[in-house]
Structure formats: C-alpha cells, structure tokens
Amino acid sequence: MTEEELVGVVFELLRRIAPETDPRALHPEENIRQALNIDSFDALQFIVAISEKLQVDIPEEDYGKTANLKSLIAYLNQRINK
Amino acid sequence: MISFKMPSLGADMEDGTLAEWRKQPGDKLTRGEIIADVETQKGLIEIEFFGEGILEKHLVSEGQKVPVGTVIALINQEDESEESPVVEIPPSSWEAPIPSSEKLSVSESKVSTPVRASVERIKISPLAKKMAEVNQVDVSVIQGTGPEGAIVKEDIERFLSSREKPEVTPPSSKIEIPEQSRPSVPHHESIRMAVAAAMSRSHREIPQYYLEKRVDMSKALDWLKEANKERPIQKRLLPVALLIKAVAKALDEVPDLNAVWENGLQRMNEIHIGFVVSLRSGGIMVPAILNADVKTVDEIMETLNDLIPRTRAFKLRSSELSQSTFTITNMGDGGADKVFGIVYPPQVGIVGFGEIREEAVVEQGMIGIRPVMDVTLAADHRATDGLIGGKFLAALNKHLQNPESL
C-alpha cells in the first residue's frame, strides 16, 4: 500500500468519526484529536477502525504514535510494509 | 387495566410527539418490548413497556404531541377479569386526564406562546391546551365544562365556532395539529435548551454542596495497561469503564446517594449510572448504564461501545433516558483539570472526573510524580450532607486503589 493510499484510508475513517470536519485541512504535525475535536472514546474507535481496515494490530503502547498525521502514516507504513 | 403514560425521559422533558405505534390493539406485550416511537427534544426514542398484557387501545394518535404523564394507551393485564377496569376511560376517546396544576405550570413555563401568561393555574386538558395554542385562544376567558371546571376539547371547539374570524380557522369537528417536520436528528439548540431547563430547575430547587478529592490513578492505570495487553483491540478498556464501575461500587456502600428526591429521599434498589455524552453538534445527552454495579468492567465497556454511538445517532430507548439513579460527567483527556457537575433532578448526586495528569505527590514524606485525577461531587443537601458525600468519595478512592477487585 502506498503512502497516498494510506492517507486516503485515514481520511476516510476520520470523516466517519468527525463528519463535519475536513481532515485534508490537517497540518501533518498537528494533533489530530485536538484539531478535529475527537474524544477518548472516538479516538479508540478510530484506532479500532484502522486496525480492522488495514488488518494490523496496534498495541496500546503505540497509541502515542497515532497522534498526528505525519507520525501516524509513518507508523502504519512501517507496520504494513515492513 | 394499566394506563400507559407518556414517560418522562428526564427532568428536562415536557412533552413528546407520538411518531409511530409499534404495537396495535390486540397485540400481546412482553416485558421490555417497544410499544411506540416518540419524538422528543432528544431525538426519536423507543418507548419500552415493562409489564405483560394485551394492548387494548391507543388513546393518542400518531403525530399528536402530548405532555409527559398523559395516558397514551390502555393495556389489559392477562390475569385480569374483564369487569375490573381500574382506570376510567375518558369519555372522549383520546382525551387525556387533567394534569395537576403543578405539572401544568411546569409544562407551561417553556418558550413564550401567545397563551402562556394566562394559562397558569387554569385547569385545562392537554388536548384543549394544544388546540388553544394552535388557534391562539386566550383560555382565561373560557369557562370550562370538564371535571372540576377544567377546560376540555368541546369548550375550545365551542369558543372557536363562536369566535368571529374572517380568515380560515380549522373546522371545529376535526382538530388539526400541525404535523411536526419530524426531524430524526434534533437541533442542538433544542437539546441545549432542554438541558438548560433541567439545570435551571436544579439550581432553583436543590441546595447543593460540593466536595473534591484528589485520587492517585497509578494503580488503576497500571492495571488497565496490563488488562489491555491481553485484550484484542476491539475489547480494550478505557479508564472511564473502570471509573463507572468504581462509582457503582461506592454507591452500593453509600446508598443514600443512589436515590431520587421526590417528596423526600427515596433510595433506589438498582444502580443505573447516567453518563454524560457530548454531542459533536453541541449539547449533551445522558444515557444510563443500567445495573452498572452487577456488570463487570468488560461489560461496562461493551455497554459504552453500544451506547455512545447510539446516543450520538439519537437512537436511544426510554429506559436508557429515564432510569438513571446517579450521574457521572467525565472530562477525559485533553479537557479541564476539574469539572463541577450540577445535580440532575430528581437525582441527588453527580460526580465529576477531571483530566488525569501527572503531578508531584507527597507520600510518606517523599515526593513522587504520579498520575492524579481530581474527583468532585455535587449533591443535594436535602438528601445527604458532607459527611455522607465524603464517605462516598473515600469509598470511590478505595476502589480505584484496588482495581483488580473491581
């Protein structure tokens, strides 16, 4: 999966959780949850959705790496395309 | 015969519009079955019936808006002999009983309507009131002919037909109640106003006291971390599941806070925790986690996984909106350090959880860095006092220091 495809998946799942926002406006190093106003419950749902969609396990200690787009995409890239 | 009434889905609900009957006359009803869908300020709610019997009759038609407490259907209990109707059927097939004047003044205190000021302390049936509102009739000039001089449908009809009015008025034989646009998603303003009404009532009626306690969350978070390692991602626990369980257990020890204030303190047998959910569009809803004390932490998390998305989609059942015996408001991470709740009447207490954050903590003369959380309690001083409230916070703290036994 290319990085562009990964970004597409992430945006789609973010739109599902925060439908009134536009994830394309996110700055790569901006905190996703703060920018899109996502609470801890929806944050967990987002991680579950990514994990199911990409068939990848995301252990709890890695949640911190999902905080912004840059680190999230890098993390997923490394988990999937290792 | 059972009179099935429009349920109150919280102190902030004044009326509901019967959107759809899910059960028809002659249908058998079993415990927990959904009898109707009702449109409220909180969305389309499934109304459950907690009994058994056969639906005898609808007293309210689809599209009709009636105040809380109005009898909307008659239900025949199966073991009942035919000649023992306990409830009188009103002469007019769908006219509801007269609400008490107290109830009336509450339901009249909402947004300004042309007849608002004059309606107070006038006995009037809900249907007649609705007709008066629709037709902008000043009911203070009408002499009621119903029970105890109450104004009923016929009185309004008589008034309308005698009123000289060149423009078109609805035909007097058939009452036209304006069809609601029936939005399945209520506007956030209406939700905010409903909550504000309940909070205003709380401030007006409840003498509240406030307590606060700082809780060391190291043990709880360590336990969660270990617990989540064993769980697949879909089953992982959030700290709030542990907090809800700890509150339920603390309430079990301090039952005076698991109660409602209705003509005095009434302790509740079951522990149903109302959980404040913020809506993305603005406003909050407070669905209940039923029987939280007998659920495991995993079951509470499963309930949240089901309940929170349904709350945000405005798809709740009546029991989930009406049965809370205590409330939790949780800031979660990224929020404020402390949150001071406002007691949601008729409940007598609300606990507020601030954000978990690292702080310097002194223990046995040593300073350490620990994750801590400020917990607040707001409670009804008519029901309890600071001593009981303090006992509750101490019990809550004790349970959070022993997460493995939750």
Image (cartoon, coloured by chain):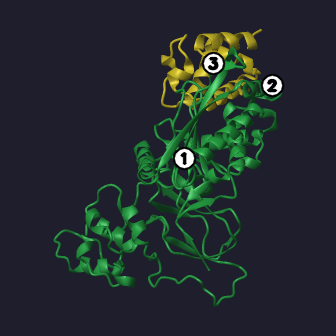
Return the x and y of residue B218 as percentages of the image width and height. Answer: 72, 23
Task: Say whether marks 3 and 2 touch (CB < 8 Å).
Answer: no
| B263 left or right of B216 in image | left
Q: Are there few (<14), some (14-19), or many (20+) residues within 10 Å of tag 3?
A: some
- Residue denoted by label 1: B379
Up the image or down, A46 lies above or below B211; here it is: above
Instruction: Identify which residue, B278 or B153, lies in the foreground.
Output: B278
* Contact? badges 1 and 3 (CB < 8 Å): no
Q: Which residue is drawn at 44% across and 77% down?
A: B95
Residue B274: in sight, yes or no? no
Q: Residue at point 40% right, 84% down?
A: B147
Mark number, residue B358: 3
Q: Residue B226 carries which label?
A: 2
Nearer-N-terminus badge (1/3): 3
Q: Nearer the viewer, residue B56 or B384?
A: B384
Residue B18 in the image: x percent, y percent?
A: 49, 63
Query: What kind of element bears circle 3?
Result: strand
Q: Which amino acid does label 1 sit on?
A: Ala
Query: What amino acid is labelled 3 in the image?
Result: Glu
- x%, y% of residue B332? 59, 30
Q: Determine the secondary structure under disc 1.
A: strand
B68 and B176: which is toward the camera = B68
